[in-house]
Image: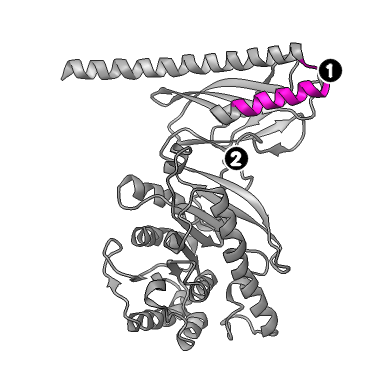
Amino acid sequence: MKNFRKIFFLLLALCLVTNVFAQGKLLKNFMAELKVAGKENQGEDLLNVQKSIFDKFIKENGSPVIVDKGEGNYEITFLYFDKDFDAKNPSVITISCDNHPELSGTELKNIKKTPIFYKTVKLKTDKAFLTYMIKENDGYQENDPANPLKHCDRKKSSLARLSDKVGGLEIFRFESKYEWMGARDVYVYLPAEYLNNIDNEKKFPVLYMLDGQNVWDEKSLPWRGWKVETSMERLVQEGKIQSAIIVGISNNRNRTKEYAGWCDELPDEPVTDSVEFKRYANEHRLMIVEEIIPLIEKNYNTISDRSGRVIAGSSYGAFCSAYIASQNPDVFSGAGLFSGGSTGFEQIIKEDGFNFSSDKKVKFYIDCGTGDALEMILLPGTQHLKEYILSKGYKQAEKPSDDGDLFYQESVGHSHNEQAWSKRIPDFLEFMY
């Protein structure tokens, strides 16, 4: 047994040394290729060739280049291509790191006669990722253009994975063709399993979440967010669920109209123009179904049918999720309704909105808290919706891990906020996945 352990640690050490050597060789080959290009090209042709060499290196190795040396020690090489490079007056390129401030102020070195800058730093940490920004001269901080992964902090910092147990976000600005929808951020969380196997053909289910700017694990979010990605990765590691892509769709200033405009009555706002409200709600639904879903399925490895799609939201987001599920059972196979209740649920019941055919039955997770006045107002409508769904022949699961097409819970003491929903999101994920 002792000999086996010695052999194991020797092999591990050999692998780590090999990785470090391989990184050094990669950078040397990269610089040698740039040097050859400098001799064979000039002017704009040279710039294009240098950009091509840079892009090829990033595609093959990622940005930044990370070598795990073991026991929390890393060598990290940051790279940057200055598209406005002036050889006579090279820019000063620096790194700032919020969660590793000891790296802030690190200055990248210019590879002579090229618009490319780099710096290899050593880092000892027990954290699973590094968040960073790049600054050129005295300008604004910006994301690393060569790294698509971002963090959900206010700056949307670039994210470097130091562990294969965490995923990462891609964030893009989406503008709808529907006149009243405007532009908004869409967050796409790619789970660890997806990023660890980026070249394979495995398809992943997708969870679409409303109020998508608030569903992540980040201290700057209201009540520190839902922590949906953290809960999912933990449950995957525990073997309780499969990995899923999570798409967070941000709301905009017309949230009430988008999410609840389909309701004839709203509990906290008189409907002064029901035609306008209903148009907002319908355009929002169509934006998700006709624009965002096809865009996600075109660009990521997804299960591209109803079996791979679930929608979820809280409060008015629960109204909206219920509405979209009722209108599009051919698109979604599941819906999560957190702290909804009230007039939206009552209208679903009144209109028999969940009268699905057997092949288009939608699986429901429904909950409500009891910890504040608003939750107590919403609770009767939530209970009524549960009874209505059971009357449609649904089988209620007693635990999230049980078979069934409805899971319902009342969470004693839980208030109407992201902190409470973050405590219940694991039950939702386990029931759906």
Q: Amino acid at mark 1?
A: Lys
Neighbour tally class for label 2: few under 14, some 14-19, many 20 plus, Cα within 10 Å: some
Asked where in the image residue 81 lies, by quadrant, the reply is top right
Q: Is residue 109 visible?
A: yes
User: Which is the main secondary structure of the residues drawn in magenta?
Assistant: helix
- Mark with earlier residue (1, 2): 1
Q: Position of residue 130 (x, y in %)?
A: 53, 35
Q: Give the spatial CA distance, label 1 vs label 2.
A: 31 Å
Asked where in the image residue 290 lies, by quadrant, the reply is bottom right
Instruction: Point out the stretch of residues depicted in magenta.
Output: 41-57
Q: Position of residue 115 (x, y in %)?
A: 74, 23
Q: Nearer the viewer, residue 83 or 286?
A: 286
How was this image coloured?
one colour
Q: Amino acid at mark 2?
A: Pro
| Residue at image location 40% in from the left, 47% down from the top | 233
The residue tagged with tag 1: helix, strand or loop? Answer: loop
Which residue carries the number 2 mark? 148
Q: Is residue 197 magenta?
A: no
Q: Is residue 153 visible?
A: no
Q: Are marks 1 and 2 in contact (CB under 8 Å)?
A: no
Which residue carries the number 1 mark? 88
